């Protein structure tokens, strides 16, 4: 059984658009930065992870709006 296309799911289309990939990348970088800064400030690691995750979630919403 042969498939047409380049072997990607969805018939050759990428899973994410370039805009979505950029939004998620920037949000992940912001979250990682916030988590590292919280850890370096002396917070316990669960607090630092929570700060990073909250920043990443907010970052997705923020970057989705400003990148148009």
Image: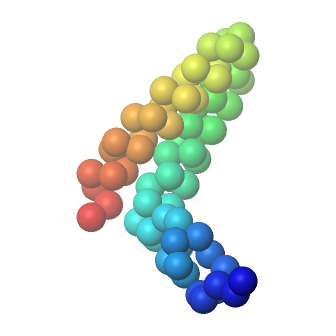
Question: Residue 31 falls in which quadrant of the image?
Answer: top right
Q: Residue 49, position in %: x, y?
A: 64, 23
Q: In this view, does 19 lie to the left or right of 28?
A: left
Between 13 and 58, the residue placed more toward the observer is 13
Between 68 and 30, the residue placed more toward the observer is 68
Quarter of the picture containing the C terminus is bottom left
Q: Residue 12, position in %: x, y?
A: 55, 81
Which residue extends farthest front? Answer: 1
- Residue 28 seen anywhere in this rendered image of the structure: yes
Q: Which residue is drawn at 72% across and 83% down?
A: 1
Q: Is residue 37 left or right of residue 22?
A: right
Vertical side of 52 occupied by 47: above or below:
above
Q: Residue 16, position in %: x, y?
A: 49, 64
Q: Residue at x 41, y 66 (%)?
A: 19
Which residue extends farthest top? Answer: 44
Color encoding of the figure: rainbow
Question: Residue 40 falls in which quadrant of the image?
Answer: top right
Q: Which residue is drawn at 28% across and 55% down?
A: 66
Q: Is residue 67 left or right of residue 52?
A: left
């Amino acid at each position: 059984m042969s498939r047409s296309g380049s072997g990607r799911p969805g018939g050759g289309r990428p899973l994410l658009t370039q805009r979505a990939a950029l939004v998620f990348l920037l949000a992940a970088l912001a979250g990682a930065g916030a988590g590292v800064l919280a850890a370096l400030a002396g917070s316990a690691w669960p607090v630092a992870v929570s700060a990073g995750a909250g920043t990443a979630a907010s970052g997705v919403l923020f970057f989705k709006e400003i990148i148009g």
